Image (spheres, grey):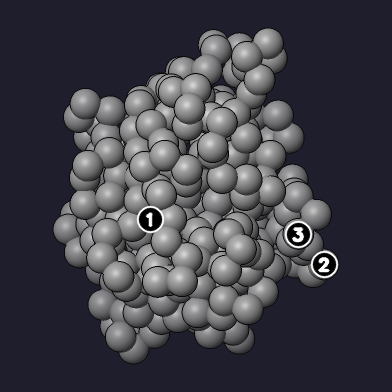
Amino acid sequence: MFDGYGVLAMTGDHLDISYRDADPWPDMTPQGSIKSFTFALGDEERGPVVQMGLITRLESEPLDWAHVVDPPHYHGTDQFRVVSAGRWSLADKTLEAGSFAFQESGLRYREHPEGDDPAWIFLVLGDRRGTKPTILRDVDREQLINTGSANDRPLDWDEIYPHPAGPKGIAAINTSLGKCQRGYLVARFDQLPVAGRVASARGTFGDAETGPVTHMIRVGGVEQLLPATVCDTERLVLITSGSCHIGDRSYQAGDIRIQRGGTVMPEWQSGEDGVAATLLVADRRAPLSAFEPDHSLPAWAAAK
């Protein structure tokens, strides 16, 4: 199920969004130094929530990230991030462009941009029941910036946290790259293990039954990444570097395609300069399969 929270709508079989085109993005601050799209995918109760951030430092809009934008807090769900441009600090770890990170549920942290270049941040909260933040200090709660997003608003003290395990949730991250260390796994697309022509890794997070599956892939030159495929849940493709084609549409770094569940996504092929990309399958219960019976999935996409 796709839910654009009244801002985004999917009228056809897919929706395209781009970090390279800032005009349609809603402003989260008065002058637009923070722009964001938020939408939900997959299971209506336990599926993931995606928050896309387009962060630009403006001298005319200085922001107190430590207390007003992103004070120390934690969430009741696992998280997954991709940085496609700029530099990003996550819990005192620097994520350069071309990095991705898994973060276990319930960890206290802060995050903010590093440097002056615009940052393209892609965040997936694995289980929508755990999206609400718990802000650690009362003074930070009182002065927290109002982004207009209900997902960013902490609960009142007398409200019951939606996740049955409480505000710290249940950590359930599994990846082909190994386990999280002290709650985090940080890696880069250019360090992905190579098998055949495609370098890839896979991870699951969020609810252990309905949470998303994410595939991180990198390939040099022109290759078929996937034949035409179908899946009963939404799929999302994020291009971090290089270029590709899905059917007759071209995608470059910073572009995203959200495919409606139950529809055919045309053949996916990398461009001449190769591609580094993420494929997110919103609900792990929905298998990805080739649309044509005489075609098959590559090993990276068929991995369990």
Q: Residue at x 69, y 14 (%)?
A: 159
Q: Amino acid at mark 1?
A: Val
Separation of marks 2 and 1 at Cα, in angstroms: 26 Å
Residue labelled with disc 1: 82
- The answer to whether the residue labelled 3 contacts the one labelled 2, judged by CB atoms less than 8 Å apart, is no
- Relative to residue 102, is residue 22 drawn left or right? right
**123 on left or right of 162:** left
* CB within 8 Å, label 2 to label 1: no
Q: Which residue is mark 3?
A: 7
Q: CA distance from mark 3 to mark 2?
A: 13 Å
The N terminus sits in image quarter: top right
- Secondary structure at numbered mark 1: strand
Q: Check disc 2 and report its element: helix, strand or loop.
A: loop
Q: Residue type at mark 2? A: Thr
Q: Residues within 10 Å of mark 3 (few under 14, many from 20)?
A: few
Q: Which mark is residue 11?
A: 2
Task: Please state the horizontal and vertical placement of residue 263, each as a whole percent of the image.
Answer: 73, 61
Residue type, mark 3 in image: Val
For the point 36% across and 25% down, which residue is it?
Answer: 107
Observer-side mark, 2 or 1, equals 1
Q: Nearer the viewer, mark 3 or mark 2?
A: 3
Where residue 200 sits: x, y (%)? 29, 56
Indicate left or right for 102 with 20 as reference: left
